[in-house]
Image (spheres, rainbow, N blue to C red):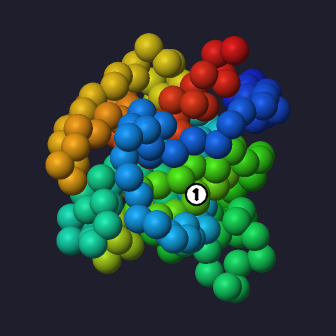
Amino acid sequence: MNKTDLRQILLSALAKRGDSSSDFDLNPGIRLPEGRTPRQAAVLVAFNESDGSLILTKRSAHLKHHPGQIAFPGGRRDDTDVDLEATALREAHEEIGLVPSNVEVLGCLPTHETVSNYIATPVVALAKGPFVFEPEAGEVEEAFTVPFEHVTNPSNFRIEGRRWQGQKRFYFTVPYGPYYIWGATALILRRFAERIEQ
């Protein structure tokens, strides 16, 4: 797939209407604390323009939230961020050394609410390569890529479950090699894969 085809596929998917999602979509019975106020965040869903592969990270094992999990580069919006696209670009630069000038933002997907009390905006982009990942040791254990065909094929996704706070919690997964991609990351990718397939 060439760069022009990749851009057109992504833009076409972004142009389709869709609803916001949440970690509770498969778990409507989960009770959340009253009065919770989710914080704004953004993640960068960046595809390498040279081969279409998706850039993901493995979070450091010692982090308080989601240790060792596979995630998009991203995080909480800072007061200095002009918008959520700026948040995603800043976080990707801080976490894996992806220079904002090497990223072409194409648009945003509907928001996703996480169990850790964030409303995350997925920012879809093309990343110019080649580049060398520089994981920030305090947050990121590893940065890697997954083939476009793997994360955009709905048939590669499964629903699994485990016990969480005394209840059975269900979630999407899309494992790739040694990487167990699940939860919010997998759900956002599953929804995007549906848009691409339409």
Q: Is residue 44 visible?
A: no
Q: Label 1 sits on what residue type? A: Ala
Q: Is residue 83 above or below residue 144?
A: below
Furthest residue in direction front, as rendered: 34
Instruction: Give the residue number, with chain letter if any, for mark 1.
Output: 120
Residue 137: % across, % down: 31, 74
Which residue is rendered at x = 51% and y = 45% of the image?
A: 22
| Element marked by disc 1 | strand
Q: Is residue 192 left or right of residue 185?
A: right
Q: State which quadrant residue 159 falls in.
A: top left
Which residue is depicted at the point 37% across and 46% down?
30
- As displayed, is residue 193 above or below residue 105? above
Question: In the depicted view, which residue is nearer to us: 106 or 42?
Answer: 42
Q: Position of residue 147 (x, y in %)?
A: 46, 30
Q: Residues within 10 Å of mark 1 (few under 14, many from 20)?
A: many
Q: Position of residue 168 (x, y in %)?
A: 23, 38
Q: Which quarter of the image is occupied by the N terminus?
A: top right
182 and 36: which one is in front?
36
Q: Residue at x 69, y 44 (%)?
A: 109
Query: Does residue 148 appear to the left or right of 144 in the view shown?
Result: right
> Considering depth in this image, is 107 or 54 the residue closer to the camera?
107
